[in-house]
Image: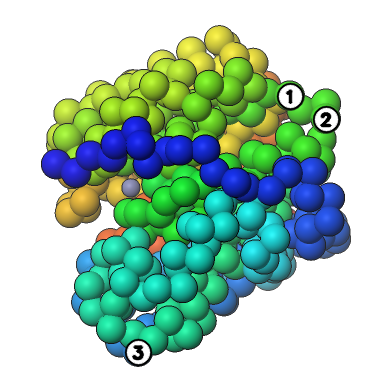
Amino acid sequence: MATVSPEETVENDAMPKELAAESKLYIDVGIDSVPVVYRDEYNIHLLGMEKLHPFDACKWGNVVKHLKKKQLMKDMKLVSPNEATEADLRMVHSASYLRSLKWSINVAKITEVAPVALLPNIVLQKRVLKPFRYQTGGSVLAGKLAVERGWSINIGGGFHHCWGNKGGGFCAYADITLTVHFILNHYPHLERVMIIDLDAHQGNGHERDFMGRKDVYILDIYNKYIYPNDKYAKRAISRKVELFAYTEDEEYLERVSTHVEGAINEFSPHVVVYNAGTDIMEGDCLGLLSVSKQGIIERDEIVFQKVRQRNIPIVMLTSGGYQRATASVIADSIANLSKKSLIDVSSH
Ligand SMILES: [Zn+2]
């Protein structure tokens, strides 16, 4: 089982967070758009090489295709984010980490597709890292929209294995950390952020980035027997729920309900970042849990219901889960949130 050692979390030389004021990621969004963030540049087209990976590398576009097919969301006007720039990323990442991405071998390790190491870095920058930078920009912008509208969804992002000094597990940029920094810097009245991480894997990236912070509360519910088993990062989890492999709906949903409720009551967050990975779904060869499609829909409903009923802004990120069926489940879940009046997707 892969582990990550504490030495890899040494202080990084990231730039002051105040630079957020000069960023182009917080654009103004008209009220005629619904706070669902996406653009076609999210998707990865790697000369057919993406087929070597068990992932649906166009999952994000496929979610939108499914959404558009639904009568209710046919005419939904989505929000198009900007790409996170080097200056944006430096608010979280060390210069040496960003430099390391200029070597194809390092990008191959992060994406876990070995032949990627053979591609010229210029191809990887354009075909892999650029999509990730757009998704990172999307998460940050979704943070702003959540504060303005009460909720938002980035149809991408949720790279929870990446921290300031290191990437891994298909995560090259620490978009969750960056999203939280932007919120705390732009909205001084929002002092407490909660990360609810319900991807099947432990979210060791944001955990390492927020180690020791009193203003960030992390609830992490994950399969304890899979990657990354990062013992050092676990110290940063405020409420840790470790699941056995192949946990099914009833137990899973009971735990989600109990601990989301408990965490919110304990911390009274001003904003929630919800990392809604769908790799908890039965059949996922990485997540190794046994939650049904309906279980995922109910999980998202529980989280939105508990957070929204208290008028706490929530930003949802789609994170892990790349089986072919995943995109339709995410779309069905968003449709269910709308049906239950937990989100309003009608354009104004
Ligand atoms: Zn995952």
Which residue is found at the position 68% from the left and 57% from the top?
A: 88
Q: Is any part of residue 17 visible from this angle? A: yes
Residue that numbered label 1 is attached to: 191
Q: Is mark 3 within 8 Å of ligand 1?
A: no
- Using the numbered discs, state the Cα–Cα distance from disc 1 to disc 3 in whole angstroms: 45 Å
Residue that numbered label 3 is attached to: 47
In depth, the one of 191 and 9 nearer the eye is 9
Mark 1 lies on a secondary structure that is loop
Q: Residues within 10 Å of mark 3 (few under 14, many from 20)?
A: few
At label 2, the amino acid type is Pro
In depth, the one of 142 and 283 nearer the eye is 142
- x, y (%) of residue 319? 44, 51
Which residue is found at the position 64% from the left and 22% from the top?
A: 215
Image quadrant assignment for residue 341: top right
Residue that numbered label 2 is attached to: 188
Mark 2 lies on a secondary structure that is loop
Q: Are marks 1 and 2 in contact (CB under 8 Å)?
A: yes
